[in-house]
Amino acid sequence: MWCDVEVINNRYSLPSILETLVASASTLVWDFDGVVADTEPVQKQAFTEILKRRGITPAPDYFKQFIGKSERDIWNVLAERFNISNSIDELIRERSSYYLQRAQRLRPAPFVKPMLDAARENGGTSIIVSSGSYRHIGALLEAWALRDRFASVLCSGSPDVESPSPKRELLQGVLARSSPPVLLIEDNEEYLTIGSRAGATTVAVGHSLNLIDASQKWDFVLMQPTDIG
C-alpha cells in the first residue's frame, strides 16, 4: 500500500491506517541511511569524491548495488575493482570527514517524528539496526536531538553492540527478541524480506537510489520527498 505523509497546519501527518499500526506496535525497527534521513545521495557523493581524488569516475548508477552494505565491505570491493593502494582504514577516515561535513545539513525524513511520537505515546519502543557507522549515525541523531528517542542503536561502533556483527544477524536477533506486533521500516529489500518472514509489518521506504518493488507486497511504501532536507 502506498502512503503519503500529509502536511496539515505546517505539521506532517501519517495516514490514519499507518498511524494506527504504529500506535499498536510493541517495537519499531528502523534502518538509518535512506530511512531516518535521506542520506544515501550524500553517501554516494562522499564515495564519489574520494574516488575522484584518485582519478576514478564510476558510472552514475554504480553505487546502487551497495545500498545496505557496510562501508568496509564497500571499500573492499572498490579497492580491488579500481586497484586502490590506500588501506581501507585510511579510505574510511577520509570519506567520513567529507561525509559528515555535508550530512550535517540534512534533516530527518518527515514521517520519522510522527511515527516516533505515535509509538512513544502508546508505549512502543524504537530501535535502529543499520549497516552504517555509529560515528555517523550517532553524530546526526545528536544534532537532530533524536538520540534519546531510540532505545538502542545497533550498528558498527555503537556502545549498544557488544561485538561486531553483520546487520543481518543484528536484525534477526531484534526480530526474534521483540514481541509482536513489530514494524520494520527499511529501504533494502533483502532486509524487508527478513522482516516479512519473521512476521513483522513491513514499511518499505523508497528514495532516489533504490527501486522499491511494490509488487513484493510490502505492507506499506513510503517515499522520501525530494524537496525536504
Image (spheres, rainbow, N blue to C red):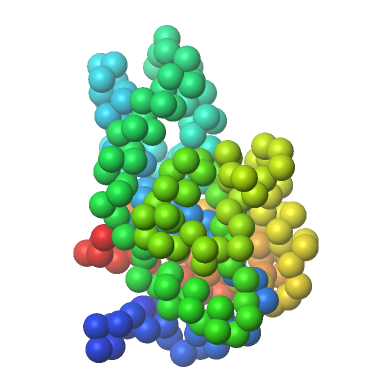
Establish if 138 lies above or below 22.
above
In the rendered structure, the answer to whether residue 30 lies left or right of residue 3 reads right
User: Looking at the rendering, in which quadrant would you find the C terminus?
Assistant: bottom left
**Residue visible at 42% across and 55% down in the picture:** 142
Location of residue 208 in the rendering, given as x and y in whole percent from the top left corner: 32, 54
**Residue visible at 29% across and 66% down in the picture:** 225
Q: In this view, which residue lies farthest toward the left?
A: 227
Establish if 160 lies above or below 176.
above
Establish if 6 lies above or below 91.
below
Judging depth in this view, the residue of 50 and 144 nearest the camera is: 144
Q: Is residue 206 visible?
A: no
Judging depth in this view, the residue of 16 and 216 nearest the camera is: 16
Location of residue 91 in the rendering, given as x and y in whole percent from the top left corner: 41, 22
Classify residue 205 by image quadrant.
bottom left
Establish if 88 lies above or below 21.
above
Classify residue 23 by image quadrant.
bottom right
Classify residue 164 by image quadrant.
top right
Q: In this view, which residue lies farthest toward the top?
A: 85
**Residue visible at 39% across and 38% down in the picture:** 63
**Residue visible at 44% across and 51% down in the picture:** 33
Location of residue 37 in the rendering, given as x and y in whole percent from the top left corner: 38, 58
Q: Is residue 11 visible?
A: yes
Location of residue 51 in the rendering, given as x and y in whole percent from the top left corner: 31, 23
User: How many numbered marks, from 0 up?
Assistant: 0
